[in-house]
Amino acid sequence: MSKPSLLILPGDGIGPEVMAEVERIIDWFGEKRGLEFDVTRDLVGGAAYDVHGTPLTDETMARAQEVDAVLLGAVGGPKYDSLPFELKPERGLLRLRKEMDLYANLRPAQCFDALADFSSLKREVVAGLDIMIVRELTSGIYFGEPRGIFREGNERVGINTQRYTESEIARVARSAFELARRRSGKVCSMEKANVMESGVLWREVVQEVHDAEYPDVELSHMYADAGAMQLVRWPKQFDVIVTDNLFGDLLSDAAAMLTGSLGMLPSASLGAPMENGRPKALYEPVHGSAPDIAGQGKANPCACILSFAMALRYSFDQGAEADRLERAVEKVLADGVRTADLIQAEGASPVSTSQMGDAILAALD
Ligand code: NAI
Ligand code: MG
């Protein structure tokens, strides 16, 4: 059998710094666990613009379409602020997401015990929290037509349109149900069916997909505003939450922040299953290129490392190895190893990006 393929796009700023630690971990899995990948490395964002004059070449795009998973660091930086819109680093990432048609954005909110005091909520509310928000990423109000600012009589009117087709709802619902089967078997779908027709359709279609294909999964429905309240009141009642692009944008940011630092947050964006049954997939930390700390060895590599753990689980069917990696991160945090972003008290001394990588490798051993 050929090795699973991985395209690594470190990008800009701290992207290459955190990705270097991920590459050491990938090597560890090859050497110690016999889990080898066919790795290609390439440029994206400003790094690609500097060399090729475009934030993503057609060759890189084509490679992304054929590999089993893409792992991306971060793109962007002040150096590129004055570029025209089409050449900005972010366009490279947007093109990847759009052309790979990555419609299901997975944002875990997982609380590592050692960081529970980082939360703005009480320890008992967040300790042990492990939920997954699945946000529809390619449709809804950010894309619907008509849109724009128009003149109506004596005043301007701003218009955006929430539009969802049945198939768009069904495919993201399937992603959520598939995830639930690998987790605790529970999905809560959130919309505003009480005031929005698109929400009524959302609720109907999610229920239909459930009844026809996933009757073994426990499905509930909640209005998104009530869901927001419940997320803050008692987040542990949820396992997988599936919701539209707009509500998912808000709910996933809020849920992620229940658990601490930007430097700890991974994500996955999944598309349709390929011929080999694996979904098209792009894994990346939630954070950006952090120009304020780039080049200083201060970045926390955990978000990018945990994104690779998600790749192990969702692209490569290596759930046990993903657990192993997550447990190593957890152990290192429990031992008190902290990059600067994870330190609240004055006087504590932070470790560098590569020292955090060292500690995680040692914990894996
Ligand atoms: P950012 O996420 O890069 O940084 C926000 C703050 O969090 C900064 O103070 C930064 O130092 C800190 N931070 C972020 N990641 C960290 C890590 N791993 N370890 C320690 N500290 C960390 O967001 P910002 O400053 O709004 O954007 C900077 C650049 O990144 C911009 O060009 C923006 O467009 C781009 N960006 C790219 C994203 C991506 O590639 N997916 C996402 C968000 C922003
Ligand atoms: Mg957002």
Image: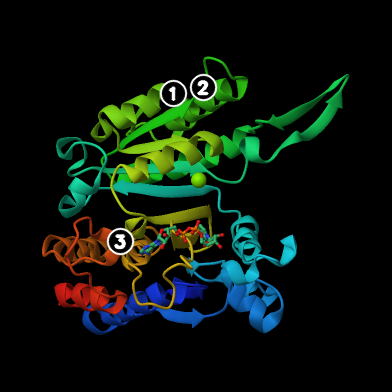
Disc 1: which residue: 225
- How many angstroms separate mark 2 from mark 3 (CA)? 37 Å
Q: Residue 56, position in %: x, y?
A: 65, 71
Q: Is residue 14 visible?
A: yes
Task: Name above or below for residue 256 compared with residue 80.
Answer: above
Q: Quadrant for the N terminus, please.
A: bottom left
Q: Amino acid at mark 2?
A: Lys
Give the CA distance from mark 1 to mark 3. Answer: 31 Å
- Badge 3 is on which residue? 341
In three-dimensional space, the C-alpha distance between marks 2 and 1, rounded to whole angstroms, equals 8 Å
Residue placed under numbered mark 2 in the picture: 192
Q: Nearer the viewer, mark 2 or mark 3?
A: 3
**Horizontal and vertical percent position of residue 315:** 41, 62
Give the mark nearest the N terminus, 2 or 1.
2
Q: Are marks 2 and 1 in contact (CB under 8 Å)?
A: yes
Q: Is the residue marked by circle 3 packed among few (<14), some (14-19), or many (20+) residues within 10 Å?
A: some
The mark that comes first in sequence, 1 or 3, is 1
